[in-house]
Image: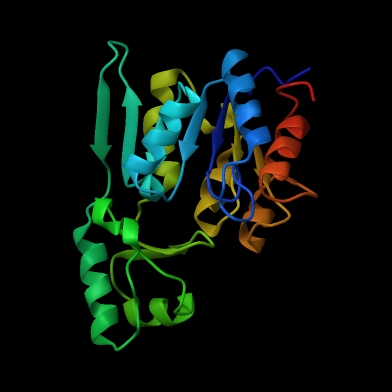
C-alpha cells in the first residue's frame, strides 16, 4: 500500500529515465505511462531546454508540469487546455558570468542546445567546476552540475523554487511527491520530497539528500525507486 500523501511523481530526465547513453529506456517509459494511468501525474524537472522537455512530455502523454533549465523555465497546461510558459530566472547574470569566464581565459564552451536556452547558460564539463566558481566568486550567480553539463543560473533559481510555484496549482506540495534525481542540481528538491530517490550512479550530494538510494543505476534505478516508494506495486 502506498503512503496516502504521495500523490505525484517528479523526475529528472537524463540519468533517470535514460540509460548510460542518455537514451530513453523502454521500461522507464512503461512505468511512467502506468503512473499516469493510475492517476499519478508525472512532472519533469530537468536541466534540458523547454523544447526538448516538451517533446518528451507530449510523447509520453504526461499531465504534470515541466520545470526546464533547472527551474528557469516553467510550462503547464491550463484548465482551459492552453499552453502556459513562464520564465522564472533572468538570463543576464548568467550571460555576464559566461563572459567573465571567457575573459579569465578559461576554455568554456556553451552547449549546442543553448541556442534555445532562455534563462541560463549551460556549458560543457571540460573545465573543473571549482575553477568556474573561483572566477565567479562574489557574483549573483549559482554554478551547478548535472553530471552532463555545468549550468550558470541567476542566484536563487533552481528546480525546487519552480516546483513550489507550480505544485499548488495541482493541489500538491513537494511533500506529496516522489522525487527522483541524480545530480547536484537535484539536491534541494530531493531534500524537500515526501520520498526522495537518488541512484547508485548519482552524485554524492544527491545520494546524501535522498531518503532512498537505489542499488541500481539509471532507468533501472528509476523503477527500483518507484517500487521502494510504494506508489505502485512492482
Residue 133: where, in percent of width, then height? 40, 76
Please give the name of the residue rendered at 76% of the width and 38% of the height, measured from the top-left corner: 224
Q: Is there any visible trace of residue 7 in the rendered image?
A: no
Q: Residue furthest top?
A: 80
Is 98 situated above or below 75? below
Question: Which coloring applies here?
Answer: rainbow
Is 217 situated above or below 2? below
Q: Quadrant of residue 57?
A: top left
Residue 114: where, in percent of width, then height? 29, 58
Viewer-nearest residue: 141 or 58: 58
Left/right placement of residue 220 relative to residue 142 reads right
Please give the name of the residue rendered at 26% of the width and 51% of the height, measured from the top-left corner: 116
Q: Is there any visible trace of residue 122 in the rendered image?
A: yes
Left/right placement of residue 110 relative to residue 15 reads left
Residue 226: where, in percent of width, then height? 70, 32
Left/right placement of residue 185 relative to residue 214 reads left
Please give the name of the residue rendered at 40% of the width and 39% of the height, measured from the top-left corner: 53
Is 53 situated above or below 231? below
Amino acid at each position: 500500500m502506498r503512503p496516502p500523501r504521495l500523490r505525484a511523481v517528479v523526475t529528472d530526465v537524463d540519468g533517470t529515465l535514460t540509460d548510460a547513453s542518455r537514451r530513453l529506456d523502454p521500461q522507464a517509459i512503461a512505468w511512467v505511462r502506468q503512473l499516469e494511468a493510475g492517476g499519478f501525474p508525472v512532472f519533469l524537472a530537468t536541466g534540458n531546454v523547454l523544447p526538448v522537455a516538451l517533446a518528451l512530455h507530449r510523447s509520453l502523454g504526461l499531465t504534470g508540469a515541466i520545470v526546464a533549465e533547472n527551474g528557469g523555465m516553467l510550462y503547464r497546461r491550463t484548465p482551459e487546455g492552453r499552453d502556459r510558459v513562464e520564465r522564472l530566472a533572468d538570463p543576464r547574470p548568467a550571460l555576464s558570468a559566461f563572459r567573465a569566464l571567457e575573459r579569465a581565459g578559461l576554455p568554456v564552451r556553451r552547449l549546442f542546445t543553448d541556442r534555445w536556452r532562455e534563462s541560463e547558460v549551460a556549458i560543457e564539463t571540460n573545465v573543473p567546476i571549482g575553477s568556474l566558481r573561483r572566477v565567479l566568486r562574489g557574483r549573483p550567480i549559482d554554478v551547478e552540475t548535472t553530471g552532463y553539463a555545468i549550468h550558470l543560473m541567476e542566484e536563487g533559481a533552481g528546480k525546487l523554487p519552480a516546483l513550489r510555484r507550480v505544485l499548488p496549482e495541482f493541489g500538491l506540495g513537494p511533500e506529496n511527491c516522489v522525487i527522483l534525481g541524480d545530480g547536484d542540481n537535484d539536491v534541494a528538491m530531493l531534500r524537500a520530497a515526501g520520498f526522495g530517490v537518488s541512484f547508485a550512479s548519482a552524485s554524492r550530494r544527491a545520494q546524501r539528500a535522498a531518503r532512498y538510494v537505489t542499488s541500481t543505476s539509471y532507468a533501472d534505478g528509476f523503477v527500483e525507486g518507484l517500487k521502494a516508494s510504494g506508489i505502485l506495486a512492482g
